[in-house]
Every structure is written in structure tokens, then in C-alpha cells.
Image (spheres, grey):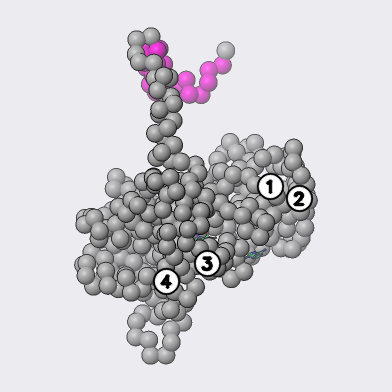
Amino acid sequence: MKKAVFEEFDGYKGIVDEIGFSRKHGTDYTVYRDSVAQQINLLHPSRMTLRVSDIIDETPSTKTLRFVSRDGYLPPFLAGQYIALFLEVKGVRTSRPYSISSPPNQTGYYDITVRRAEGGLVSNYLLDEVRRGDLLESSGPSGHFYFNPLFHDTTLVCLAGGSGVTPFMSMIRETVECGLDRALYLFYGNRTLDEAIFHDELSALSERFENIIYVPVIEDPLEGYEGLTGLITGDLIRETIGDSALKTFYLCGPQGMYDFCVPELERLGIPRRKIRKEVYGPPANIWEDPGWPEGVKAEDQFRVSVAGADTIDARAGEPLLTALENGGIRPPSLCRSGECSMCRVKVLSGKVFQPAGVPVRKSDRQFGYVHACVSYPLEDLEILI
Ligand SMILES: Cc1cc2nc3c(=O)[nH]c(=O)nc-3n(C[C@H](O)[C@H](O)[C@H](O)COP(=O)(O)OP(=O)(O)OC[C@H]3O[C@@H](n4cnc5c(N)ncnc54)[C@H](O)[C@@H]3O)c2cc1C
Ligand code: FES
């Protein structure tokens, strides 16, 4: 009989022998299964119910929502992680991820800081409709955008745009409140100074702690503004941080910021492995993506039939996940950025557009699975959820 590939791996036989020995002579861990499951669920719950304990105005377009646990316990997280909120808005059951802006050492609450997206479904609901005392459903903390002391340098150079400052706020607050041995530069780009979230707090922390260096950069300043203006360029970064060795770079913001800043960092000779990017939702105006097929318009409509469920309408320019939710079908979701695999669906027939760089596993690609949050119908589809 043909051997399975893993049987060829170094050490395979040793592991098989060890498992055999443990089964015969060791502890039967299956009796602990329930208590282990309970512990895992406490640390990594898939769902939590949160109560809004406070709402803090930050800028004209941004508020912080403070959540406490309805059940008295919030799982730990790492500064930089997010939670996804699951909610029903205008009859659509959907989800959106928000980075936690409070530091992990504040164990009694999570803050999220929400900026209004013009015409956006959930941000407008959170900013205008949610009140103190309301209950919201969320995921447990998730995501990989955090400092890892094993692999990352203890000097962090962070580049943020707009609401992309939120994970860095958690990192900065943790650094100063816990006296961590880290230095953190924050280059923070906004169109106007009014839009810079946490500007006063960041300025004050930067004055007080020499390991926090805050550099606001304003694209479209009012006359007489004396700070830095324009975009976050490689030259500005080099002048501020000096030598780029032994520094790890973190980016969080809109796609346009990545398109501009990553080449600027590469121009400074910073290797890709030193550049960490937070996911930030599906690309805006996907039809402007260089790989978008000619002849397909954003508003082209297709039919998507879901095996065992309904058939719904979907537009080419809108993520398949959004179309499914608008049609009353709600596949699991978390990051809505193509990273977590929660929204995987199998395309049985028809074609979708997936922007380059979406991390679909090789086996998924081979068997026709796609991430619905970053897949766009190009034809009528038949899918399996
Ligand atoms: C990991 C992660 C962390 C995040 N953290 C934060 C955070 O800390 N703070 C924060 O404010 N946001 C954060 N976001 C973004 C957040 O999840 C939402 O995407 C954001 O609030 C907008 O959601 P919305 O429902 O209001 O907008 P949506 O309804 O999803 O619309 C998004 C944008 O697309 C436009 N749009 C809507 N419908 C259409 C359409 N049919 N065709 C074309 N354009 C359309 C809207 O005008 C809007 O500008 C994060 C995202 C990720 C992935
Ligand atoms: S929701 Fe994470 S990959 Fe789609």
C-alpha cells in the first residue's frame, strides 16, 4: 500500500511509538475533555455578550465604546487584537471587526474606537443608535497583529492612518502603564488635525515618556499649521528614526496608505519580513484593482444559488459575503479581510474575482474554496456553505 506523505517525515516513527506507549501506560486524558473544553472556552470564547458601560466622544466623527462583560469575565488579549461585533442593522444580520484600543492590563473592560464611514451600515449604527446599557454580541479577541517578543525587535515603528491608530493605542497604553522595555514611534497620518484620534493623549504621553515618539502628519492642514504636513514618506521616517536596523515596522490604515508606505519602506531597504500589516477590510472600489477583468461593471447583477438554501442576487462590485448577508444568509465571519478563513465557501459552479495576495490555502484553492468576504461574483454562481 502507498505510504501517506506524513509517514515520510523525520521522527514519524518515534511519535507513533510514543503515542502507542502513552495509550498503554499513560494517563487517559479523554476524561479531562470537558474541563479542558471549559478552560479553552473561557480563554477563547467564540461568542461573548458585552454591555456598553460608557460612550466617549473622541473627534467629531469618532467615539469610543467601552464594554464590560455581562457575565463578569473578559478573556485576556494581546495589544493589537480585535473583536468582531455581530449585530442586526436595518434587518441585515452582519458582523464587523474593531481593534481593541484599551490596553490588555485593563482587565475590566474593552474599548473599541469607531470612526464614521460615510454611508457605512454598522459604524453609523454604533455611533448614532447604541446607548449606555445596550447589550452587543461579539467574538473573543482575535488576530495576529501584535508584538511577539520572540521574533520582533523591541523598537516598534508604527505607521497609522485614520482609525488605524486604534491597535497602536492599545500597545502604547500598555507600554507606559506596565513600564515595558520597548520604544514605540507612531507616525500618524490624517487629512486634518481635527480627525487625529487621541491626539491630546498621544502628545501628552510623548512629552512624558521618552520611549514614546508621536509624529502626527497632516495632509490638508489649516493655514498657519506648524506641524509636519503631507504624507508619511520614507525620508520623514529615516530622519526621525535614524538607523532602521533592529526595528520592526507595523502598518495599520486604509489600503491607500499601504500602497504608498510599503514601497517607501522598501526604498529605505527595510526587508518585507520586518514589515507587519494589519488587515483592514475588503478593498474599496474593487473594480479599480489591476486584476479586475475587463468588461465586468461593478453594478452587474448575478444570481447566487446556495446549496440547501435560497438563491440571492449579488453585485459584481460587492463582496459575496455582503450579498449573502443582505439575502438573509449568514455564513460565519470574523476578519472580513480574507485572513481568518471563517467565511470559506465552496464554489460549485461559476467564477469569482479574488484580489491578489489573499491567503487562500493551496488545498482550498485546489478544491474550489474561496473566502466570501473578499470574493466578487463574475457570473451566476452555485455555492456550498
Ligand atoms: C481587523 C480590523 C480592525 C478594524 N478596526 C477598526 C477600528 O478600530 N475602528 C474603526 O472605525 N474601524 C475599524 N475597522 C473597520 C470596520 O470593521 C468597518 O469596516 C468600518 O466601521 C465600516 O463599516 P460600515 O458597516 O460602517 O461600512 P460598510 O457598510 O461596510 O461600508 C464601508 C464603506 O464602503 C462604502 N460602501 C457601502 N456600501 C457600498 C456599496 N454597495 N458599494 C460601494 N461602496 C459602499 C461605504 O460608504 C463605506 O465607506 C477594522 C477593520 C478590520 C478588518
Ligand atoms: S471573514 Fe475572515 S476570511 Fe472572511
Q: Nearer the viewer, mark 4 or mark 2?
A: 4
Disc 3: which residue:
127
**What amino acid does circle 2 point to?**
Ile
Question: Mark 1, residues whose alpha carbon is within 10 Å: few (<14), some, or many (≥20)?
Answer: many
Give the vertical position of 82 relative to 349 (above or below): below
Disc 1: which residue:
329
Distance (Cα) linking label 2 and label 1: 9 Å
Query: Which comes before the other along the chain, label 3 or label 2?
Result: 3
Answer left or right for 106 relative to 33: left
Answer left or right for 210 relative to 141: left
The reply to whether residue 108 is visible in this rendering is yes
Disc 2: which residue:
312
Q: Nearer the viewer, mark 1 or mark 3?
A: 3
The span shown in magenta is 2-23
| Mark 4 vs ligand 1: CB below 8 Å | no
Contact between marks 2 and 1 (CB within 8 A): the answer is: yes
Residue at (34% x, 66% y) in the render: 186
Query: Which comes before the other along the chain, label 4 or label 3?
Result: 4
Query: Which comes before the other along the chain, label 1 or label 3?
Result: 3
Give the vertical position of 132 relative to 351 (above or below): below
Residue at (40% x, 12% y) in the render: 23
Q: Secondary structure at mark 1?
A: loop
Answer left or right for 54 relative to 157: right
Residue 2 place in picture, x, y as percent: 56, 16
**What amino acid does circle 3 point to?**
Leu
Distance (Cα) linking label 1 and label 4: 35 Å
Please check the rendered image and state whether residue 314 is part of the magenta-colored stretch, yes or no.
Answer: no
Disc 4: which residue:
58
Residue 11 place in picture, x, y as percent: 38, 21
Query: Which comes before the other along the chain, label 2 or label 1?
Result: 2
